[in-house]
Image: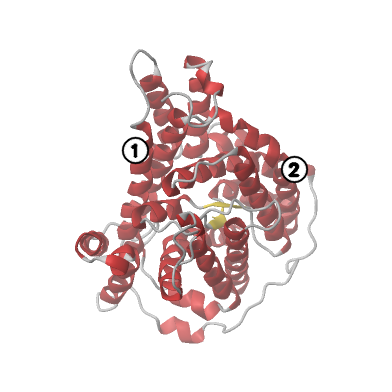
Amino acid sequence: MSHSAHPVDQVPPKAQLLAFGLQHVLAMYAGAVAVPLIVGGALHMSTSDIGYLVNADLLVSGVATLIQCLGVWVFGARLPLMQGCTFAAVTPMVLIGTTGGGLPAIYGAVIVSGLVVVLLAPWFAKLLRYFPPLVTGTIILIIGLSLLPVAVNWAAGGVGAPSFGSPRNLALAFGVLLLILLVQRFVPGFLGRIAILVGVVLGTLAAIPLGLTDFSHVTSAQLIGVSTPFHFGLPSFQPAAILSMVIVMLVTMTETSGDVLAVGEVVGRPVEPPVLARALRADGLSTVLGGVFNTFPYTAFAQNVGLVALTGVRSRFVVATAGGMLVLLGLFPVLGEVVAAIPMPVLGGAGIAMFGTVAASGVRMLGAVSFRDNSNLMVIAVALGLGLVPVAVPTVYAQFPDWFQTIMNSGISAGSIAAVALNLLFNPVRAITPQGAGNS
C-alpha cells in the first residue's frame, strides 16, 4: 500500500480489499433488496419477476457504486460511498404502479428524474455554502438517529416476522453486538478492523442450530441471471408520474448531500462544491441506468458511512470492491441467496454499532461549534426535533398531501431543510460562509 497518497486513495492488499468489501456488502444488503421486494409485492408481481427485480437492483447498485467510488468523467465523488435504491421513492412508485401506469410508467418517471438530477447537480452543489459545521453536524446526527430504529427492527427479527421481538432474536442480536465490541477492543490489526464481518459470520453460524436460518434453498436458486434493458416493456412517460418522481429526487439530492458531507468528514477529505456536483451527477446517471435496467432511483447509503467511521478504513477502493461484489451477486442469483440467508437479528446487532457511529460522528462535528452568545443550540434542538418526528411517529403526516409526505416523511430531508432554514434565520451572515469557516 502506498502511504504517500491520502488514505481515501490508498489501495489495501487484495485479501483486505475482499474482507473489507464484503463487510460493506453485508451491511447494506438488506436495505439494498428491500425496495424491489416492497414494490414488487405491492404490484402483485410473481415470485420470479420479483427475483428479477432484486437481481437487477443488485447489478445496478454495484455499477452505481463503482461510478461513485472510481469516477467516470464528471460523474462520481471518488469517495467511499455505497449506492442503493432510495426508500424515499417507494410510496410514489407504488402509487404510480397501482393506478394504471404499471412498471413502464415507473421506469419512464425514473429515467426522466435521473436526467433532471444530472442537469441540476452543479446548481444544487452551490448550496454547499449553506452547510457550515453547525448544519452538517446536525444532519449527520439526524442520519444516525434515523437509522437506529431500522437496526432495532432488524434485531427484533424484521418488521412483520412472526417471531418479532422474541428473546431468542434479541439475544442473538446483542450477542453479535457484544462480539463486535470484543473483537474491536481486544483483537489487534486487520482482524480488529473486520469486527463487523467476524460478528456477522459467527452470528450466522450460531443462528443455524437455533433454527433462525438455513441454506437449503440455495441449491434451488438460479445460477446465472442477466438483466436486459426494458425487460418489462418500453417505458411510458406520464407527466404526473414524472413530476412526483422529480420531487422525490430533489429530496434524495438533499439526503445524498448529507451523506457525502458525512463521509467527507469521516475520511478527512472536506467536500467542496465540485465534488458534491460529481456525487449528485453519479446519482442521476445511476438512476437513469436503473430505469433502463429494470430497477429504481439510487442514492448513497448512510449505513455504509457508519461502517467507514467504525472501522477507520477510508479507502474508496474497498467500497469499489464491494460494488464489484454486488455486480456478481446480480449476475449470479445463487450468491445472492447465500447472503440473503443471513438472519435479520445478526444484521441488527451489527447495525446498532454502525448507525450509532454515524450519530456519534455528528456529535463530534458539533463539538467544534460555539454555543456562546448565539442561538446555535436552538438551531440544533428544533432541527433535531423535526427530523425525528417521522422516526418517532411514522404515520404523523398521513393526512397530508402526497408531495408533503414525500418531503417530510424522510427525517433526513425534513431535518436538513430545518437545519439550513434555522441557520439562515439565526445566523444570516455566517450562514453563507464557506463550509468549515462559519458557526464554529
Which badge, 1 or 2, is on the more N-terminal residue? Answer: 2
Residue at the location (42% across, 47% down)?
266
Q: Considering only vertical position in the picture, is 264 above or below 174?
A: above
Q: Quadrant of residue 47?
A: bottom right
Q: Which of the numbered marks, if any, corresponds to residue 70?
A: none
Any part of residue 85 in sight: yes
Mark 1 touches mark 2? (CB < 8 Å): no
Which amino acid, by three-letter code, is at mark 1?
Answer: Arg
The residue lying furthest to the bottom in this view is: 219
- Residue topped by disc 2: 119
Any part of residue 98 in sight: no
Q: Residues within 10 Å of mark 1 (few under 14, many from 20)?
A: some
The residue lying furthest to the front in this view is: 4
Q: Residues within 10 Å of mark 2 (few under 14, many from 20)?
A: some
- Work out whether residue 82 or residue 223 is closer to the camera in this orientation and state it: 82
Q: Which of the numbered marks, if any, corresponds to residue 364?
A: 1
- Work out whether residue 326 or residue 203 is closer to the camera in this orientation and state it: 326
Q: Position of residue 85 (x, y in %)?
A: 57, 55
Q: Is residue 404 left or right of residue 189?
A: right
Q: Position of residue 22 (x, y in %)?
A: 44, 69
Q: Which image quarter is the N terminus in?
A: bottom left
Q: Is residue 166 left or right of residue 113?
A: left
Q: Position of residue 434 (x, y in %)?
A: 55, 28
Residue at the location (78% across, 58% down)?
235
- Work out whether residue 252 or residue 268 is closer to the camera in this orientation and state it: 268
Residue at the location (69% across, 44% down)?
117
Mark 1 to mark 2 CA distance (whole Å): 34 Å
Q: Position of residue 81 (x, y in %)?
A: 52, 54
Residue at the location (57% across, 29% down)?
129
